[in-house]
Structure formats: structure tokens, C-alpha cells
């Protein structure tokens, strides 16, 4: 029975100085044990060329993308390195009237993971309504 790899490809068995299992879709392979998943193709190719017994483990999660678009409406393509907690305009009146802005997340503020440049831009544009937080 054909095994299905995590990526959706089929696990097939090949011969190359011994039997090995490999995925016909992402090319991850292993001479022993399960075929690793999440494999980077370039790293995989290199491991194969180096006669490594199995594919390298999957790359770490993709770098988080800047989410400043939640505020600006324009997608930023940089990597997020910090978090900004900011109050949407439609909430500010409520909080100003109450004389207190409450606490995230129940106060309506939003936490966005953003790049350095966007963090500075947001803080400059929103003043007290935006602050950098550790997340
Ligand atoms: Zn696969
Ligand atoms: Zn950005």
C-alpha cells in the first residue's frame, strides 16, 4: 500500500546503493525510518549529493511577515521583528470618554507583528495610541 507523505506526495521506494524511501513530490528521502517532512529542496539536494542517510529536517517556520497592513491597509513585505499594540480609531473615542484605555485584548486594541520601520511609523502616526510590546 502506498504511503502518503505529509506534503501530499506518495512515498516510493528507490534503489541507490541500498533501498530508500522517498517522496515523489517534495523529494525528501530516508534510508531508514520515516521520511522527514518540510524539507527545503536545495538542502535536500545537497544532503543527497553528500550521501546523507536522510533528508535534512524541515526548515524552521517561515519568518513572520510584517502585519502593518492591518493598520495601513497596505501590505508590507518586510520581516516582522517587533509587536505594536495599537488602538483602532473607532475605539479611541470610547476610551477617551472613559478616561482609561483598558487592557489588551479586551479593550479593543490590536497587536500586530511588524518590522522596525513600520513600528516607528505607527508610533509616530498614532502617538499614545500605539506602543511597542514584548510578545
Ligand atoms: Zn513530500
Ligand atoms: Zn513593515
Image (cartoon, rainbow, N blue to C red):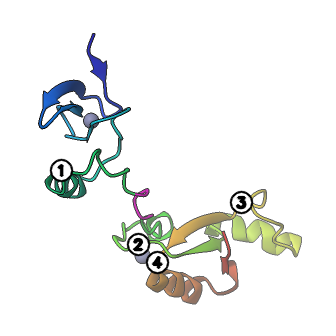
According to the picture, the residue beneath numbered tag 4 turns out to be 115
Residue under pointer 2: 79
Span shown in magenta: 60-64
Q: In the image, residue 34 lies at what x, y percent?
A: 37, 32
Instruction: Specify whether residue 61 is painted magenta.
Output: yes
Label 3 or label 2, whichever lies nearer to me, is 2
Ligand 1 closer than 8 Å to label 1 CB: no
Whether disc 4's CB lies below 8 Å from ligand 2 is answered yes
Q: Determine whether, in the image, residue 95 is placed left or right of residue 81.
A: right
Secondary structure at badge 1 equals helix
For label 1, the residue is 48
Taking 27 as reference, is 6 left or right? Answer: right
Q: Are marks 4 and 2 in contact (CB under 8 Å)?
A: yes
The earlier-in-sequence mark between 4 and 2 is 2
In what element is the residue under mark 3? loop
Q: In the rendered structure, are the residues bearing label 4 and label 3 in contact, judged by CB atoms less than 8 Å apart?
A: no
Q: CA distance from mark 4 to mark 1?
A: 36 Å
Residue 104 is a magenta residue: no
Label at residue 108: 3
Residue farthest right in this picture: 99
From the image, state whether disc 1 or disc 3 is nearer to you.
Answer: 1
Quadrant of the rendered image holding ligand 1: top left
- Asked if residue 116 is positioned above or below residue 65 in the image, the reply reads below
Q: Residue at x 70, y 84 (%)?
A: 128
Amino acid at each position: 500500500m502506498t504511503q502518503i507523505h505529509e506534503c501530499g506526495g506518495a512515498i516510493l521506494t528507490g534503489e541507490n546503493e541500498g533501498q530508500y524511501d522517498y517522496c515523489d513530490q517534495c523529494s525528501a528521502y530516508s534510508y531508514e525510518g520515516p521520511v522527514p517532512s518540510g524539507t527545503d529542496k536545495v538542502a535536500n539536494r545537497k544532503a543527497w549529493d553528500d550521501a546523507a542517510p536522510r533528508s535534512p529536517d524541515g526548515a524552521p517556520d517561515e519568518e513572520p511577515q510584517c502585519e502593518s497592513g492591518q493598520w495601513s491597509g497596505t501590505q508590507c513585505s518586510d520581516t516582522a521583528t517587533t509587536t505594536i499594540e495599537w488602538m483602532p480609531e473607532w475605539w479611541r473615542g470610547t476610551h477617551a470618554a472613559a478616561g482609561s484605555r483598558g487592557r489588551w485584548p479586551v479593550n479593543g486594541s490590536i497587536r500586530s507583528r511588524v518590522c522596525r520601520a513600520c513600528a516607528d511609523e505607527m508610533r509616530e502616526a498614532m502617538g499614545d495610541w500605539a506602543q511597542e510590546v514584548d510578545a
